[in-house]
Image: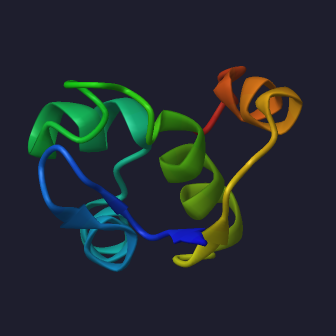
Amino acid sequence: MYVNRCVCHSLSFSHLLLLASETGAGFEQLRALTGCSTACTMCEPYVRKALATKETNQPIMSPEEAMRWLKPTPSA
C-alpha cells in the first residue's frame, strides 16, 4: 500500500511538488497555500518526505520513520 496524497484535501503529492517548484514554497508555505496537512495531519511526514526526495508514491512509514520526517528541516 502506498501514500500519494493529502486525503483530507484531495491534494496529490505530484501537485504539491509542482506548486513547490513553481513558487519555491517549503512545507509551511504549502500548508498555508493549500491546507495540506491541516485536517487529520497524518500526511505531514509524507509531504515533508516528498519535498525532500521528490517521491510521490511512498510506502507506508513505520512510526519511527514518520517521527524522523516530522522533525522540521531548514528548508521546511
Quarter of image, res 2: bottom right
Q: Position of residue 21 (x, y in %)?
A: 37, 72
Residue at point 24% right, 41% down?
Answer: 36
* Residue 19 in picture, x, y percent from top left: 25, 68
Q: Nearer the viewer, residue 5 or 72?
A: 5
Q: Name the quarter where the C terminus is drawn.
A: top right
User: Quadrant where the N terminus lies?
Assistant: bottom right
Measuring 44% from the left and 33% from the top, which residue is drawn there?
A: 42
In front of the other: 14 or 39:
39
Tell me: 34 left or right of 37.
left
Q: Is residue 31 left or right of residue 71?
A: left
- Viewer can see residue 76: no
- Residues 76 and 66: in front is 66
Q: For this view, does 27 lie left or right of residue 9? A: right
Image coords of residue 9 (percent x, y): 12, 49
Residue 75, quarter of picture: top right
Residue 73, by quadrant, is top right
Q: Is residue 38 visible?
A: yes
Question: For the view shown, which residue lies furthest in the right direction?
Answer: 64
Number of numbered labels in the structure image: 0
Q: Residue at x 43, y 39 (%)?
A: 27
Q: Residue at x 70, y 68 (%)?
A: 53
Asked which colour scheme the image uses, the reply is: rainbow
User: Residue 45 in the image: x percent, y percent?
Assistant: 59, 39
